[in-house]
Structure formats: C-alpha cells, structure tokens
Image (spheres, rainbow, N blue to C red):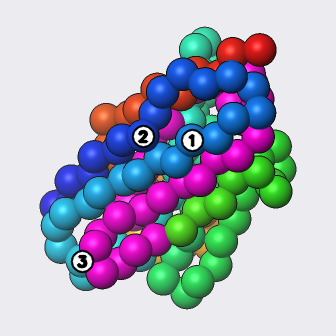
Amino acid sequence: VVTLTESGGGSVQAGESLRLSCTYFGNSATIYSLGWFRRATGKERDGVSGINTDGEIMYVNSVQGRFTISQDSARNVLYLQMNNLKPEDTATYYCAIGHPTRHLLEYIPYNYWGQGTQVTVGT
C-alpha cells in the first residue's frame, strides 16, 4: 500500500506560479509510474504529466513548456512546478502512483491516489 498527500495548491492570478508537492509513503517496490492529474468542475479527470522509473516524462499539450514534473526519490516527493498559470488550469490536482506504463497520462495504470489539492487561477 502507498499513501499520497498533495500540498501547494491555492488561488493565484493568471501568469503567476505554483509548485505542487506530493509526499508518498509505502512499499517502494510498487512505485513505477508517478503522475499528476486534474479534474475541473463538470469535466473528466485528465492526465497532466507523468514520469516513470525509466526516466520517461510526458506532458499534456496544454501545459507543455509551462509545467515541469520532477521527483526527489530520496525524500519520496513528487513535484509539479506550474508557471504562467492560466484560468483554464483551474482544477483539483491529484497525484498518483501505479504500475509500469508508458501511457503516463492515462489513469488506468495508477492504483494509488492522493486526496487532491485545489488550484484556482483568476483572470
């Protein structure tokens, strides 16, 4: 079992930055892929970014060049640096950990999820 806790959400204006953190604890042998997802009100859960133990990284097109995913494996923390935020980035952001996969933006391979942190971007 792996438990995850997100932090770092908040309310900002367009163009500003936030850094989300996800601290995870559990059986490291089950940690292969780590990802960030988001769900805006009334919309489906979407993959934002993911990273796996092979070093592969993926971003959804809408955040490419603005968001950066990183991992501090020594401290068991996953980060999402979000720059130049836009109102359309407003959502609840979730971190997730799961099975080996190259489909890092699809939620099916992920079997452990955090509780979410709210990001609100004003105009």
The dot on residue 8 is: 2
Quarter holding the C terminus is top right
The dot on residue 18 is: 1
| Residue stretch in magenta | 71-98
Can the viewer see residue 112? Answer: no
The image quarter in which residue 78 lies? bottom left
Along the viewing direction, whichever of 121 and 2 lies nearer the viewer: 121
The image quarter in which residue 115 lies? top left
Residue 73: image location, x then y, percent: 36, 78
Q: Amino acid at mark 3?
A: Ser
Residue furthest to the bottom = 54
Residue 41: image location, x then y, percent: 58, 14
Q: Is residue 90 left or right of residue 117?
A: right
The dot on residue 28 is: 3
Can the viewer see residue 85? Answer: yes
Disc on the earlier residue, 2 or 1: 2
The dot on residue 80 is: none
Crowd tier of the residue under label 2, counting other residues whose Cα lies within 10 Å: few below 14, some 14–19, many 20 or above: some
Tell me what residue is drawn at x 21 percent, y 53 percent: 3
Measure the alpha-carbon separation of dots 2 and 1. Answer: 7 Å
Tell me what residue is drawn at x 76 percent, y 40 percent: 84
Measure the alpha-carbon separation of dots 1 and 3. Answer: 27 Å
Along the viewing direction, whichever of 8 and 60 lies nearer the viewer: 8
Residue 27 lies in the magenta stretch? no
Measure the alpha-carbon separation of dots 2 and 3. Answer: 24 Å
Badge 3 element: helix
Q: Is residue 118 left or right of residue 48?
A: left
